[in-house]
């Protein structure tokens, strides 16, 4: 117990706040990986947005928002 009290005093001396009962979630979650086709890669390298990404539907809009169209 003395060790924890000493540690708490050192933290307080450094201006740090110790909170008891805090839980932090550090879970790793796999996310879907989107792959570009060869034609899409060629258009991106030519600094263009591929034609198939220009559709006006919700799925395509989400896809374009998640893609880095300025990457080279």
Image (cartoon, rainbow, N blue to C red):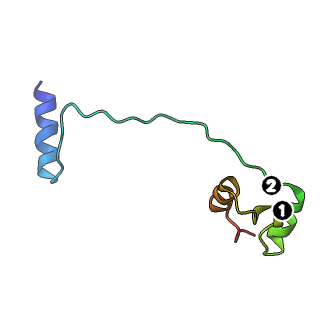
- Assign a secondary structure to mark 2: loop
Judged left or right of residue 72, residue 41 is: right
Disc 1 to disc 2, C-alpha distance = 6 Å
- Residue sitting at 18 percent across and 50 percent down? 16
Front-lying residue, 3 or 8: 8
| Pointer 1 residue | 41
- Indicate the position of residue 70 as horizontal and vertical percent values: 70, 71
Residue 43 found in image quarter: bottom right
Quadrant location, the C terminus: bottom right
Residue 22 found in image quarter: top left
Q: Residues within 10 Å of mark 1 (few under 14, many from 20)?
A: some
Vertical placement of residue 40 versus 13, above or below: below
- Assign a secondary structure to mark 1: helix
Residue 8 found in image quarter: top left
- Indicate the position of residue 56 as horizontal and vertical percent values: 71, 63
In the picture as drawn, the residue positioned furthest to the bottom comes out as 47
Vertical placement of residue 7 versus 40, above or below: above
- Indicate the position of residue 30 as horizontal and vertical percent values: 60, 37
Q: Which mark is residue 36?
A: 2
The tag earlier along the polypeptide, 1 or 2, is 2
- Residue sitting at 18 percent across and 33 percent down? 20
């Amino acid at each position: 117990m003395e060790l924890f009290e000493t540690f708490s005093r050192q933290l307080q001396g450094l201006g740090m706040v110790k909170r008891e009962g805090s839980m932090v979630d550090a879970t790793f979650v796999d996310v879907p990986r989107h792959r570009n086709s060869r034609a899409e890669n060629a258009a991106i390298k030519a600094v263009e947005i591929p034609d198939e990404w220009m559709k006006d539907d919700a799925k395509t809009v989400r896809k374009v928002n998640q893609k880095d169209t300025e990457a080279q």
